[in-house]
Amino acid sequence: MLVNMKEMLEKARREGYAVIAPSIESEACIAAAIETAEEMRSPVILSIRINAFDDDLEFYIGIARMHAIRATVPVAINLDHGRCIEDNIRAIHYGYTSMMVDRSAKPYEENVKEVAEMVRLAHMCGMTVEGELGELGWTAECLANSVSAKYVTKDEMEQELTDPDMAADFVERTGVDCLAVSLGNKAGVAPDSPDYKPLDLELLKKIAAKTPVPLVLHGSSGAGKDVMQQAVKLGIAKVNVGSNLRGNAGKKILSDPVRAKRWVFQDAKAGYKEPIAEYMTIFGSVGKADN
């Protein structure tokens, strides 16, 4: 069933689990995410960047909507890191059910003003809005492959952790339905990388105590199972995952030398399904679609 994220994430935070939001970059990813969700009886969020399919985005959002409508579990389609009004308006037009209005690289008052304006418009269209406060860390490689590269300067790549008091003010003044936070998480980083920093769980406790909305974590691939489970218990209700899924899909494809020169649908799908199922177990969302 096709839904927005509001009730899905409010239930997740209330019951102490998180919903995975896998990065979607092909039809194989769409099929993998929804098939796994149905097998695990878990809700799922398709996280799709505005540049994920270039000029074919509207077509693939249509495919995602078709699969979601037919699904027997809740499926949301969320715009990932919508950095400007053009991105957010396209999300409404193309049929996303939810959107991230990310103005975190801007000064605080500009962030509040622009997000509040888009929340008002999105809510009129029945869409959920995710905001971001604090600046997510990016590796240079990850930023180079992201739509965010159009809007984030080199200086703004430096991570800024989320302030708990500002988070409370931000949620109240913007009306966002969920909030992405910065706890030391950085996109595209593995635990053995020199760029890796452990998540600041004490900071998460303080943010969660001051903000009633579900909290979101991006850049979680390197965090580790135990840390992620602790973060979920402390209020993280949505977790975006990309690097680990792409890495596993790549291994699956390259494991057969005969097929290694082309992106094979079934191999890609299998490569995505395995870690998605594992994350659903780690996040505690298995079986939550049915109660």
Image: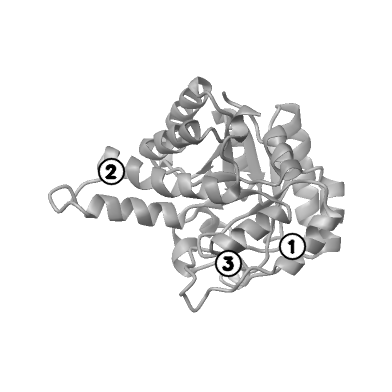
| Circle 3 residues within 10 Å: few <14, some 14–19, many ≥20 | few
Q: Which element carries disc 1, helix, strand or loop?
A: helix
Residue denoted by label 3: 153
Front position in the image: 190 or 281: 281
Image: 226 above or below 158: above
Residue kind at label 1, given as amino acid type: Leu
* Quadrant of the rendered image containing residue 251: bottom left
Could you tell whether 171 is left or right of 281 in the image? Answer: right
Could you tell whether 272 is left or right of 258 in the image? Answer: right
Taking the image as drawn, is residue 230 in sight? yes
Taking the image as drawn, is residue 92 in sight? no
| Circle 2 residues within 10 Å: few <14, some 14–19, many ≥20 | many
Q: Give the Cα separation between the discs numbered 2 and 1.
A: 37 Å
Give coordinates of residue 109: x percent, y percent. Answer: 82, 57
Front position in the image: 252 or 111: 252
Answer with mark 2 or mark 1, whichever residue precedes in sequence. Answer: 1
Residue denoted by label 1: 204
How many labels sit on residues?
3
Answer with mark 2 or mark 3, whichever residue precedes in sequence. Answer: 3
Which residue is pictured at 59% across the width and 74% down the height? 197
Residue denoted by label 2: 267
Which residue is pictured at 51% across the width and 60% down the height? 221
Q: Which mark is on residue 61?
A: none
Give coordinates of residue 246: x percent, y percent. Answer: 39, 53
| Circle 1 residues within 10 Å: few <14, some 14–19, many ≥20 | many
Q: Which element carries disc 3, helix, strand or loop?
A: loop
Could you tell whether 92 is left or right of 208 in the image? Answer: left
Q: Which element carries disc 2, helix, strand or loop?
A: helix
Residue farthest toward the bottom in the current orientation of the protein:
194
